Amino acid sequence: MRIAMFLRQRSNRKPSRRQRLQRRVLSRGFEQLDARRVLAAITGVVYADLDLSGVQETGETGLEDRIVYIDQNHNDRLDTSEPYRRTNSSGAFEFQDLSTATGHTLRMFDGSGTQNITSPGSGDVLVVFESDESVVDVSFGVEVTGENEAPTSDPVDFESKQGLSFLLMFPNGLVWKYGSDAPNHTFVAIQTSESENGNIAIDLAGGVRYTALEDFVGQDVATYILHDGRNASDPLTMTVDVIAKDAPLLGVVVEGDPLSEHAPEGTEIGNLKVLTPGLHGNVRFETNDPRVRIEGNLLILADPEAINFEWQPELRVPVRLIDLETNEEISQPEVVIQIADEDDPVTMITGPEYGDTTEYAMGTEFGFVVAEDEDSWQTHEFNVDDSRFEVDGNILKLRDDESLSYPEDDGLVINVSVDDSASGGDPVSTSVTITVYNVNDPPTAVNVSGELRERTFGGHVGPVTVVDPDPNDGYIFTISDSRFEVVDGILKLLDDTSVVYNPSSPSISLTITATETTDAQYSVDSEVTISIIENPSPWQNLPESLDVNNDGVITPQDVLIILNSLNEGGPRPLGDPFDGGNYIDVNGDGLLTPLDALLVINELNSISNLRTTPGGGFPPIGEAEQQPGEPLPVEGEKIVVSPKTVPEGESQPHRNYFASPLASQQLLADDSFDEDEDWLEPSLDDLFV
C-alpha cells in the first residue's frame, strides 16, 4: 500500500540533456561498484585418483564432463531445483554468488555406479563461508572402474496449439518415459539449446514446459542430452508441432477447477470435452489409467495416493475416444489435469541422534536439523525443550553463553520439535542424547570435623573431607605434623603416639594437603585446628583398659603390675598428673582397688577357658577366641580388639569394666578400702580358676 504512493503515470515528455547525463553517471557508478564486488564462491576439480591416495598428484588429470551439485535438500540425490555444474576439459568447476547464511553440501552425481569417490572419504564436503568474499576450494578424487555406455532416447514429438503452452512431467518426461540406460543406472536430462520459435525449459528430471510464440505455426525444435554422471548422450532433438488456433484437434480437455493434492477418493475432477466440434455427443470416453475412472463424461479420482503436487503439478491421463456409431476408436489423446498445491505436513525431523561436548564449552554445535516437508519452499521454526539449546540456521547448538556440566548433564536427552498446522496441530519431534565429557576441576578446600582426647594412643580426630566439584576423585594426604596420619579418610594420631592436654595450649594447629591421585598438579592446602579434650581418667588405658602396661596384649603381667602397686601402696585414689608409668585404673573410677586386678583376671580366665595361643601363651588383643566347632560370633557380639587393629569404619571403643566382671564365675569385691588394713601377697597360680 505504501508502494502505491510512489506510482506515477508514465510521462510522454522526453528527458532533458541534463537528466540523460545524470542517468549515465549513475549507471556507470553502479557498474563500477558491481565490478569491485567479490561474492562467496566454491571452486574445485574432479580428478582421476589413480593411486587412491586421496590427493591429486602429478599425472592424475582432471575428469571432463562430471556433474557436481549442491545438495540443498540433504537427501544425497540430485533434485531438479538444486544447482549443479559440469566440469570443463580440465575437470574444474565453480559455483558463484553463494549465500553465506548457511552451509553448502557438495556432492558428485554418479548414476552409473562405476565411480568410487576416494576423497573426501565421506563422499561429500560441507562448506561454511566465513565472509561474503570467501572462496573455498574443493576437490573430488575418483576411482573409475569398468565400462559404461551413455543413456539413449526414443524419438520425442509433441503437439501444441498456437500461443498455448503444455507441461510434461513425471512419469511422461524425457527421462522416465523416453530415455533408457543400463539396469540400475540413473540419469538426468540437461537442456543444451533454446527453441527458435517458443520458450522451453527442460529440468533434470526430464520435465518439459513449452510455450510457442503468439504468431508461430509450424515445427519447433530444441536439443538436450541424457547424462548418467560419467557419460553423456549425443545431443537429442525434441520436436513440437504447433497448430494454428482455429485448426481442429482430435483432443480432449477437462473442464473444472484444479484438483487438490489432498482430495479424497471419489472427488469429481471435471467434465471431459472433445475439442473437435463435430464429435460433440457422438463419442464415449474410456481410460485404463488406474488413478481415475470415467462415468459418462465425468472424470473421477480413483487413487488419491497417486496425487502429489510436488511429484507432478499436472496429471496427464490417456483417454480413448470411441465413435458411438461405428464403435471404433477415433483417437487416444491425453488430458491434462492441473493439481493444486496445499500445505503438506512435516513428516519427520532428521538430525543427529547423539551429540558430544565437553564440560564448560559454550556454543557447541551438534549438527544439522531438517524438517522433512514436501513443501520445499516452506520454512519452519524449531523449538528445543531445553532453553540452553537453540536451532540457528538449521544447526542444533548450545547458545553462545551456555555450557553443560559434568556429571549433572551427561546423558541429557533433549527434544527438538516443530509446530506445523498441516499436521493437525501436533508437533513433530526428534530426540538427541548429549554426552558431556568431564574436565578435571581442582579441589578447593580440606575440612576436618572432630576433636582429640588426650593420653589416647592412636586417637581418632574425625573424618577428612575434600571440597571438589568432581565427586569421584581420589586423594593423597600429607600432614605438616608428623604425629598424625589419615587412614581410610580419618585423621588420627599414629598408633604409638598420644598427646597431653595443656590448659595454656588446648589445641593443635596443622596443615593438611590433599593431592589428586590422577593429577598431582591439582592440590589444596587447608590449616585446621584440633581441640584437645582433657582425659578424666588419665590412669586408664584407652581404648583397651585391660592392657595395663600398653604392650598390645593382655597377660598375667598386667595383673602382677596392679598387685605389686597394691602391695606397695594399698588401695588408694590415683591423683593427677599421670606419672607416665602403667595404666593401673582398669575401670576408670580414679581409684586403685582389687577390682582393677579382678577385671583383668576375669578376662584372662575367659581367654584361657576358650583357647590359648600355640606354645601356651595368650592371644594378642583383638584376636578372636574360639574353640573348634564353636559357631562364629553373631552380629552384636563383642570381640576384644587392639587400638592398632580397629575394624575399618569403626571408632575406637571405650570399654567400661566398672562393676561388669566378664568371667562366668561370680567374683565379689568390696570397692572400698581401709588404709590400716594389711594386704596379703597372693600366689599368682591361686588367682586363676
Image: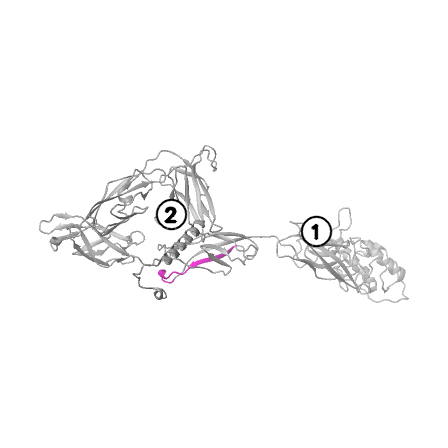
Q: Which label sits on residue 627?
A: 1
Find residue 12 and report its image quarter: bottom left
Report if residue 642 is visible in the image.
no
Q: Report the span colored magenta.
A: 411-425
- Counting from the top left corner in percent of width and height, residue 291 is at 24, 52
Looking at the rendered structure, the secondary structure element under dot 2 is loop
Q: Residue shown at 57%/54% (left/top)? A: 359
**x and y percent of residue 496 in the render?**
78, 53
Specify the quadrant that holds the C terminus: bottom right
- The 10 Å Cα crowd at callout 1, few under 14, some 14 to 19, many 20 or more, is few
Considering depth in this image, is 622 or 216 the residue closer to the camera?
216
Which residue is identified by label 2? Answer: 83
Q: Is residue 510 visible?
A: yes
Position of 375 with respect to 495 (left or right) is: left
Asked whether the beta carbons under mark 1 and mark 2 sit within 8 Å of each other, the answer is no
Q: Which comes sooner in the sequence, label 1 or label 2?
A: 2
95 and 487: which is toward the camera: 95
- Report the residue at 49% width, 54% height from top: 433
Give the answer, above or below, for where 263 lies relative to 170: below
Label 1 element class: loop
Q: Amino acid at mark 1?
A: Gln
**Quadrant, the N terminus:** bottom left
Q: Nearer the viewer, residue 490 or 45?
A: 45
**Farthest residue, direction top:** 59
* Mark-to-mark CA distance, 1 and 2: 93 Å
Q: Amino acid at mark 2?
A: Pro
In screen coordinates, is 276 left or right of 585?
Answer: left
Crowding around mark 2 (Cα neighbors within 10 Å: few <14, some 14 to 19, many 20+) is few
